[in-house]
Image: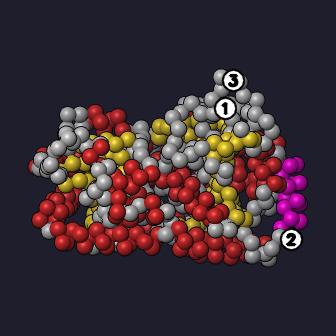
Amino acid sequence: MTTASNSTKLKPTDALDTRPSIFGRNVTSTFKKMFSFRHQPPGNLRTCMIPPVVFGTLILNLPKLLKLRFYLKKERQEHPADDVRILFYSDNLDETNGIANNLRNVIPYMRAHGMKAFLAGNAFNTRPCGVVENGYCLLLPRMFSMEQLGYANSELAIPRIGPVLRLLKRYPVDLIEFETPSPGAWLVCFCAKVAGIKVFSHYRTDVPTYTKTLVKAKWMYSYVLWLMQIFYGMTKPVVSPCKDYADILTSQLKIPANQVKILPRGLPLEKFSPDMRGKGTWEQYNGSAEGDRVRKVRFSFIGRISKEKNLEFLNRVWKKFAEKHDDVELMYVGYGWYLEEIKKSFEGDNSVHFAGEQGGETLAGLYADSDFFLFPSTTDTFGNVVVEAMSTGTPALVSDYGGPHDIVMDEAAGRILPIDEDAWLNALEECRTLFLEQPEAYNKMREVAHERSLKYTMESSTKAQFEYFRKLKKEAYGL
């Protein structure tokens, strides 16, 4: 086992991670095992521990940061002006979620095409030390972590800064893009400013709405909104994936309109194809008996199984819809803290199935075998899963708020619906009729859905991003 810093000092009984392995992620090196505070349970008042840790760490590392500032300034003057080196920092890379999955696809693509991109985040509390996964994803040793309020199996964490400084000297960067306003991002942001590194941010998570949905204490919403206004004010410009959230950045977070940039996102669409349809993937998880020839109309939800995806609403709608028909079925694909509650709610209901967390060809096959994809979330700034579903030719039903409706565009590729039970029930009825009685119209909808997904390729998105990164570097350093 190679190491990312000094040799590790692990006991023979230590495991690199006590959780089940995550599809497609392999440890390729490790950091030194370092001191960290005991992992904390969630709590409103317990979050007050975070500021002292952030500012204490910053103050203790000021001499090293100032030394790094002079080193990087000299190094940057000797580096080609049009060659951009960027670090993407996110707090949730050690989980399975849309942000982590997207970044873990985008950065390898950038690196494979000659772009100097790096990815860093925090190691989960179940790891005794930080690790490097797949040779490029740095999961830094943590110093502090606590369970995220209202969001089981997710953490607020602060990394050890020492390894970060050593890595920045070994692999200098010109820009740091923050993906979420986490405690770790605050610390890295302050350190970057002292070290003279240009920072900016990407609005990937609707944190205020998450807080309102998941946290009972009403004062937390105002507190979180205030913190976000400060954070995004420090990390301008702010990238938004769609107009809805660009408007939120200007209206709620008070970011000047000229400091908001809408940039497309890209996905590895070659992994998702209409050709995956009909290969028997769905039948592995819907409990069909061998030889069963009844072909039901298939609906699916694929993603994190959590309340902020508006799944309580979806469950209510589905129960009313399935009561009327015995030829429809819904497949949940994914994992999350709300999964067991949903299973209990549908116990004994043969119209609902659960495939668990999937990846690779199995995931692509479940997308493709779905006749319609259901995504009622109102908190997604983009909607990776919507693009993936449409890339396999599956039409999508989405809410009229957030990023997903920009992807669907209109009824030619699915449905864009208000969060109203009658509207969704009527749409499900239309979809069922379309599939059973109008095969030509349904197949045309599949074709349009696939065609619209093609605008979100890796090639087009990364090209636009790096053009913007070069502009930022030139403005920041006058090169």
Left or right relative to 243: residue 466: right
User: Quick one: label 3 or label 2, which is nearer the N terminus?
Assistant: 3
Left or right relative to 289: residue 152: right
Disc 2 residue type (three-letter) = Gln
User: Quick one: label 1 or label 2, which is nearer the N terminus?
Assistant: 2
Which residue, given by chain and number where applicable, does mark 2 sit on? 77
Within 10 Å of the Cα at label 3, are there few (<14), some (14-19), or many (20+) other Cα atoms?
few
| Main secondary structure of the magenta stretch | helix
Residue at x 49%, y 63% (from the top left corner): 267
Q: Nearer the viewer, mark 1 or mark 2?
A: 1
Q: In this view of the protein, which residue sits in the foreground, 427 or 300?
A: 300
Element on which disc 1 rests? loop
Are the residues flagged by discs 3 and 1 in contact, CB closer than 8 Å?
Answer: no
Left or right relative to 263: residue 284: left
Which residue in the rendered view is the most extreme toward the front?
A: 291
Which residue, given by chain and number where applicable, does mark 1 sit on? 128
Q: Which residues are magenta?
A: 63-78
Compared with 260, 324 (above or below) is above
Residue at x 60%, y 44% (from the top left corner): 26
Disc 1 residue type (three-letter) = Pro
Within 10 Å of the Cα at label 1, are there few (<14), some (14-19), or many (20+) other Cα atoms?
many
Question: Measured from the top left, where is residue 428 in percent x and y?
Answer: 20, 58
Q: Picture quarter containing residue 31?
A: top right
Question: Measured from the top left, where is residue 402 in percent x and y?
Answer: 41, 63
Which residue, given by chain and number where applicable, does mark 3 sit on? 12
